Image (cartoon, rainbow, N blue to C red):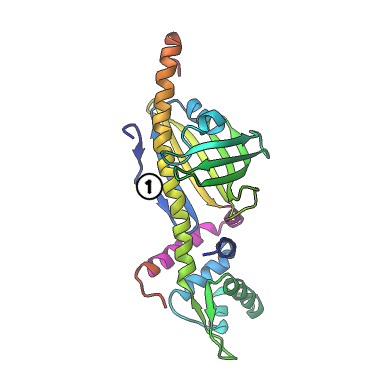
C-alpha cells in the first residue's frame, strides 16, 4: 500500500459516521437509500461520506446507475492493521531494551554514588 | 527482560495501540529515559539499532527528530512535536516517519506515555493513536471502537466480499 493511500485511509476513518458506514457494509452491500435510513443524515451527506470512503479505497461501488451498491474493500483495512502492528513490534523490542538500560543506569548510580543509591 | 512485566491488556486495532510495562526503576528515571537524547539513543528501536542523529527541543510545541539506523544500514527518520510535558508523570507527543529531508512518509500518530508509581517501581502506560482520530474525542470514540471491533471480527472470519 502506498504511504499516501494509507494516510488517506486513516484520514477517512477519523470520522465516526464513516466508521459506522463501514461497519454496516461489513454486514453486506447496501445502496445509498439503505445507508441513509439508520444514520439520520440527508442523502447528500451520506453520499459525501461514501465519496471519501471510495477515494480512500475502503469501499467499491457498483455501476448500476440508480442504486450504485456499496461494498466493503477489506484489503486496505488489513494493511492498516499491519502498519500499526509494525509499531507494536518496534515498541515491544524498544521497551525490552529500556528495561535493561534502566537496570544498567541504576547499577551505575550505585557505583558512582553509594550514599545516594537508596534515594528514590 | 526479567524485570519487565508484560500486560495482558496490550491491544491493538486499526486505530490505536495500548501497551503497559512495569519497570523496576523510579519514574523520574523512566521519564528521563524518554526525554534526554543520550538516554533515548540507548533504547530506541530493536536490538542492534543505533541513533546516529537525535535532536530534541523539549518544550510544549518543540520538535524532535531522530534517525534510527537498522543493523542492515537502512535509516529510518522520525519526527514529532511535544504536546504535553509533565515530569515525571506524563509525556504527549506526535510521531511521524519521514524521509531524510523530513517529508512525512506515513500518517501522523499521537503518543501518550503515562508513568505511575507501582510497588517501588514504575508502571508505564503507552498509548499510540492516529493523530486525526483525536478529532473523535467528542464522545464518539466509544461507539467507534465497538462498531469497529465487530468489523474486525467479521474480516477475521474471512467472509469479506
Local secondary structure at mark 1: loop
Rendered image quadrant of residue A7:
bottom right
Residue B79 picture location, percent across and down: 61, 44
Could you tell me which residue is drawn at 45 percent across and 61 percent down?
B146
CA neighbours of label 1 inside 10 A, class few (<14), some (14 to 19), many (20+): few
Q: In the image as oriented, which residue stretches furthest toward the top?
A: A115
Circle 1 sits on which residue?
B9
Q: Position of residue B71 (x, y in %)?
A: 44, 42
Residue positioned most to the bottom: A65
Compared across the picture, whether B93 is left or right of A99 comes to right
Residue at the limit of the structure toward the front, as seen here = B73
- The correct choice, above or below, for B87 with respect to B83 in the image is above
Asked whether B137 falls inside the magenta stretch, the response is yes
- Say if the magenta span includes residue A73: no
Q: How many marks?
A: 1
The prevailing secondary structure element of the residues shown in magenta is helix
Span colored in magenta: B131-154
Q: Is residue A68 above or below residue B4?
A: below
Note whether residue A118 is visible.
no
Q: Position of residue A11 (x, y in %)?
A: 59, 62
Residue B85 shows up from this direction? yes
Residue B13 in the image: state x and y as whole percent.
Answer: 44, 57
Instruction: Say which chain tag 1 marks.
Output: B
Q: Which residue lies at the image location 45% right of the left edge and 48% below the top edge?
A: B18
Question: With B64 as the anchor, is B49 left or right in this view?
Answer: left
Q: Residue at x 39, y 26 (%)?
A: A103
Residue occupying the point 45% across, 15% down: A119
Q: In this picture, is A103 found above or below A90?
A: above
- Snapshot quadrant of residue A85: bottom left
Amino acid at each position: 500500500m502506498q504511504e499516501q493511500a494509507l494516510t488517506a485511509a486513516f484520514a477517512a476513518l477519523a470520522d465516526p459516521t464513516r466508521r459506522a458506514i463501514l461497519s454496516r457494509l461489513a454486514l453486506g452491500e447496501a445502496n445509498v437509500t439503505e445507508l441513509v435510513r439508520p444514520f439520520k443524515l440527508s442523502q447528500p451527506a451520506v453520499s459525501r461520506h461514501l465519496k471519501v470512503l471510495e477515494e480512500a479505497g475502503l469501499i467499491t461501488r457498483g455501476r448500476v446507475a440508480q442504486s450504485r451498491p456499496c461494498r466493503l474493500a477489506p484489503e486496505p483495512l488489513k494493511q492498516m492493521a499491519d502498519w500499526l502492528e509494525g509499531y507494536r513490534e518496534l515498541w515491544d523490542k524498544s521497551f525490552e531494551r529500556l528495561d535493561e538500560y534502566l537496570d544498567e543506569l541504576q547499577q551505575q548510580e550505585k557505583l558512582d554514588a553509594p550514599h545516594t543509591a537508596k534515594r528514590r | 527482560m526479567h524485570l519487565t512485566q508484560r500486560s495482558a491488556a496490550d491491544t491493538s486495532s486499526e486505530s490505536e495501540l495500548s501497551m503497559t510495562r512495569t519497570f523496576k526503576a523510579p519514574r523520574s528515571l523512566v521519564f528521563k529515559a524518554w526525554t534526554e537524547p543520550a538516554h533515548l539513543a540507548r533504547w530506541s528501536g530493536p536490538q542492534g539499532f543505533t541513533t546516529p542523529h537525535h535532536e530534541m527541543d523539549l518544550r510544549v510545541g518543540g520538535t524532535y527528530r531522530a534517525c534510527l539506523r537498522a543493523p542492515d544500514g537502512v535509516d529510518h527518520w522520525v519526527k514529532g512535536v511535544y504536546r504535553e510535558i509533565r515530569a515525571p508523570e506524563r509525556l504527549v507527543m506526535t510521531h511521524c516517519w519521514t524521509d531524510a529531508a523530513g517529508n512525512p512518509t506515513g500518517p501522523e500518530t499521537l503518543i501518550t506515555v503515562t508513568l505511575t508509581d507501582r510497588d517501588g517501581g514504575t508502571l508505564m502506560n503507552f498509548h499510540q493513536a492516529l493523530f486525526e482520530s483525536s478529532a473523535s474525542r467528542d464522545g464518539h470514540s466509544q461507539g467507534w471502537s465497538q462498531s469497529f471491533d465487530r468489523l474486525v471480527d467479521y474480516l477475521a472470519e474471512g467472509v469479506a466480499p
